[in-house]
Image: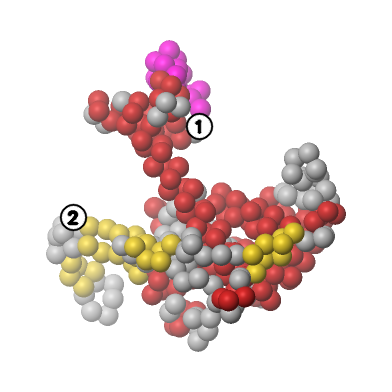
């Protein structure tokens, strides 16, 4: 609070000094501004620096813990399925050589890495149900074979876990972790637009890790880039494995109120690879001073 309150105070002062017209044209496009603009439409209590600071804290909490959990999930998944690690390293090195290192183009062309992230999210979606809605009036759906009547006050949601493990959608191997499930499908496609629908950040009625529709997670594109960068670093620098007493089985997930969490008490073993000495300076990003 001691850090955030002065930040909001200064931004509110800027808003007052500029006036509404200049503020709308020149205001910084960041979460501080978004929170202030939203608060100004509400009552005085919501406009206090303390309340706005809490909004930012909760926003950061939502962003940070989901990314941390997703990173742990994919590391567990790859440690339990080590046959995917070498092909991923080969793709990472070849793609970064082709596109000049850690560029957006390089990250976008790592189909295998993208596929592993999407498969990990399919298995480890943060929530079991998504797109939760409360009907505000009586309504009847008539598009199905049989009309479906929903009285006012009905809670409606979409089953993410059931969808992600549906054999009707994902085939008879829906309950098998296949890291290259989506990259193999994309490699057979000739239409780039269709291929993009299977990217890790893409949503659909069949893939609900980031929800779907107009309220899908707006930060999913940044999150996927962030996860790719973290995973690239881990795979290039370290050999990763589960402790031998795990017999190749990743720790089970935990479930609290329909939310899925990786087992934070689990263990992974890391050993720095000798190849890292060359790779850390190959594209100029990780030199001895910055490492």
Mark 2, other Cα within 10 Å: few <14 / some 14–19 / many ≥20: few
Classify residue 38 by image quadrant.
top left
User: Where 282 sits versus 18, above or below?
Assistant: below
Q: Which mark is residue 29?
A: 1
265 or 41: nearer the eye?
A: 265
Between disc 2 and disc 1, the foreground one is 1
Name the dominant secondary structure of the magenta segment.
helix
173 or 134: nearer the eye?
A: 173
Query: The magenta stretch spans which residues?
Result: 10-29
Q: Where's residue 244, x and y in %?
A: 62, 75
Looking at the image, which residue sits at the far bottom? 172
Q: Where's residue 191, x and y in %?
A: 64, 68
Tell me which residue sits at (49%, 33%) in the image. 30
Residue 141, visible in the rendered structure: yes
User: Where 250 sits versus 201, above or below?
Assistant: below
User: Where 276 sits versus 118, above or below?
Assistant: above
Q: Where's residue 152, x and y in %?
A: 14, 60
Looking at the image, which residue sits at the far front? 245
Q: In screen coordinates, is 221 left or right of 277?
A: left
Q: In screen coordinates, is 60 left or right of 96?
A: left
Classify residue 72 by image quadrant.
bottom right
Report the number of discs: 2
Compute the Cα span from label 2 to label 1: 34 Å
186 or 88: nearer the eye?
A: 88
From the image, tell me which residue sits under label 2.
Answer: 136
């Amino acid at each position: 609070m001691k850090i955030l309150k002065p930040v909001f105070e200064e931004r509110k002062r800027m808003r007052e000094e500029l006036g509404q017209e200049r503020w709308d044209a020149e205001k910084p496009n960041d979460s501080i501004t978004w929170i202030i603009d939203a608060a100004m439409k509400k009552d005085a209590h919501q406009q206090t620096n303390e309340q706005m600071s809490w909004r930012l804290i909760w926003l950061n909490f939502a962003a940070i813990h989901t990314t941390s959990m997703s990173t742990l999930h994919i590391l567990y998944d790859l440690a339990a399925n080590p046959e995917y690690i070498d092909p991923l390293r080969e793709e990472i090195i070849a793609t970064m050589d082709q596109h000049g290192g850690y560029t957006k183009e390089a990250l976008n062309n790592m189909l295998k890495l993208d596929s592993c992230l999407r498969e990990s999210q399919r298995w480890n979606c943060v929530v079991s149900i998504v797109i939760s809605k409360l009907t505000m009036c009586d309504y009847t759906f008539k598009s199905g074979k049989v009309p479906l009547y929903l009285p006012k006050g009905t809670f409606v949601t979409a089953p993410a876990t059931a969808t992600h493990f549906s054999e009707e959608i994902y085939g008879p191997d829906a309950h098998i972790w296949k890291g290259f499930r989506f990259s193999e499908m994309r490699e057979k496609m000739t239409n780039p637009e269709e291929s993009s629908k299977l990217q890790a950040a893409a949503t659909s009625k069949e893939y609900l890790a980031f929800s779907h529709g107009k309220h899908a997670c707006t930060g999913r594109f940044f999150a996927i880039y962030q996860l790719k960068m973290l995973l690239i670093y881990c795979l290039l620098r370290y050999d990763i494995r589960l402790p031998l007493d795990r017999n190749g089985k990743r720790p089970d997930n935990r479930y609290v109120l329909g939310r899925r969490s990786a087992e934070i008490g689990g263990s992974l073993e890391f050993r720095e690879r000798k190849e890292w000495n060359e790779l850390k300076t190959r594209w100029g990003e990780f030199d001895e001073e910055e490492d």
